[in-house]
Image (cartoon, helix red, strand yellow):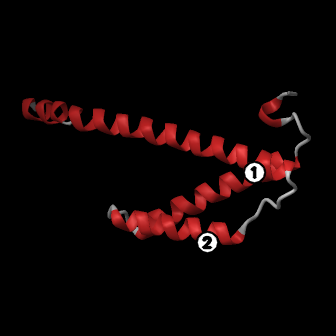
Amino acid sequence: MAGKGRTVNGLEPFRARLDELDDQIARLLGERFEVCREIALYKREHEIPMMQPDRVVQVRERYLARGAEVDLPEDFTESLFELLIAATCKMEDELIEAQPGAERGGAA
């Protein structure tokens, strides 16, 4: 059993790196959502439709290409894209439909 403890301790540098990467991923996703909030407000102000199908196709293609470049499984990249685009489109739609000043839960 003594060898098992060393094996687990030997994982700590890997786990620490994963924790750092997870923090970076969360921060980047937060930044992406913030940009999508800004886009939604711009679309609302300029009466631009929320859904931009050509842009969705471009982003999807870029996601798949970049995923392939870093050896991500294609089904993972596709699922991640679908999840991300669904969440950001939902958020944009809600912000566009909201009354001005109601974004972020309060009057501005």
Residue at horizontal 79%, vertical 45%?
41
Q: Position of residue 70 (x, y in %)?
A: 33, 61
Find the residue positioned furthest to the front: 46
Quarter residue 21 falls in: top left
Q: Position of residue 52 (x, y in %)?
A: 73, 66
Q: Which amino acid, mark 2? A: Val
Labels 2 & 1 near each other (Cβ < 8 A)? no
Spatial separation of the CA atoms under disc 2 and disc 1: 17 Å
Q: Which mark is residue 92?
A: 1
User: Which residue lies under the disc numbered 2?
Assistant: 57
| Left or right, 26 with reference to 14 | right
Q: Which mark is residue 32?
A: none
Which quarter of the rendered picture does the C terminus lie within?
top right
Disc 2 packing (10 Å; few <14; some 14–19; many ≥20): few
Q: Position of residue 94 (x, y in %)?
A: 81, 48
Badge 2 or badge 1: first in the primary sequence: 2
